[in-house]
Image: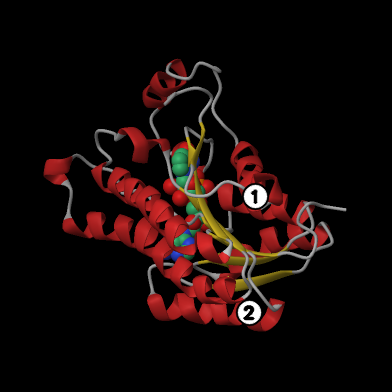
Amino acid sequence: MGILDGKVALVTGAARGIGRAIAERLAAEGADIALCDLKEEWLADTAEAVAGAGRRAIRVAADVGNAAGVQAAVDKVVQELGRVDILVNNAGITRDGFLVRMSEEDWDAVLSVNLKGAFLFTRAVARPMMKQRSGVIVNIASIIGLIGNAGQCNYAASKAGLIALTKSCAKELAGRNVRVNAVAPGFIQTKMTDVLAEDVKKKMLDAIPMNRFGTSEDIANAVLFLASEQSAYMTGQVLSVNGGMVMM
Ligand code: NAI
């Protein structure tokens, strides 16, 4: 018996890192999972892990920033798995650079994936969720969306926007029993952060009271809580998971 038995979850950016860990965690608690990423073949390992947990996995290729692709992805999930109970907007990218050198292209790319992508998927699942009078949406924001960061104005703006989107959608959908919350991870060890210079990582580590970087599983556990009935009275909230790096 899992706490998500009978549920269907859709996880974006599920090919690797935090998205993959979320898909595996939700499957371990009984959910069937629709996995979304840019290329279907990138999702093979995650799909295998979900199947290994005894749950159904379907793979959908979509660029989260493309409206037609997102609608087609949600239609496919509803057709093949019958419904969507849980949406996790996890796909995200960085294109770091200082403000004065930030290209319009890098600004648009980050806003398209991190913010517009969540808007498009939320809009696409909102109708079926409102109809079934239940649903849970979890947006993966970032500590950077709360405090800002030099060299990441595009990323910080996208994640702050995602938090505002979370709160607005929470207010709109609460009356239909659809909850919308966000997780704000701190520094998590994934391919996204592997590329940072060692001295940057050392500085980050020094700022973390728990003296370790987070794991994808740390974030997946927070998502599981927000996706389950354990958080039934929570909506419009931002759950910080950062080893104490920022306390607000
Ligand atoms: P990652 O780079 O390892 O994985 C991101 C996944 O999203 C990849 O599988 C990628 O193919 C997919 N993706 C990228 N663009 C896409 C698009 N247009 N359409 C569909 N899929 C797309 O990153 P990681 O670290 O697992 O990050 C996951 C989420 O967590 C992101 O939203 C990120 O901003 C957020 N986050 C990560 C932190 C960290 O320290 N790693 C800290 C705070 C937030």
Q: Position of residue 13 (x, y in %)?
A: 52, 58
What residue does disc 1 label? 232
Q: Residue at x 25, y 55 (%)?
A: 106
What residue does disc 2 label? 78
Q: Position of residue 120 (x, y in %)?
A: 41, 69
Q: Which mark is residue 207?
A: none
Q: Residue at x 63, y 79 (%)?
A: 78
Looking at the image, which residue sits at the far front? 175
Q: Residue at x 38, y 68 (%)?
A: 65
Note whether 154 is above or below 128 in the view shown: above
Q: Is residue 244 left or right of residue 60?
A: left
Q: Amino acid at mark 2?
A: Val
Q: Is residue 7 left or right of residue 189?
A: right
**Residue 207 at least partly seen:** yes
Q: Amino acid at mark 1?
A: Ala
Tell me the element at label 1: loop
Q: Position of residue 30 (x, y in %)?
A: 79, 58
Q: Tell me, yes or no, whether the two marked residues, 2 and 1, touch with CB atoms within 8 Å.
A: no
Q: Nearer the viewer, residue 84 or 175?
A: 175
Q: Position of residue 145 (x, y in %)?
A: 35, 41
Q: Nearer the viewer, residue 203 or 184?
A: 184
Mark 2: few/some/many CA within 10 Å (<14, 14-19, 20+): some
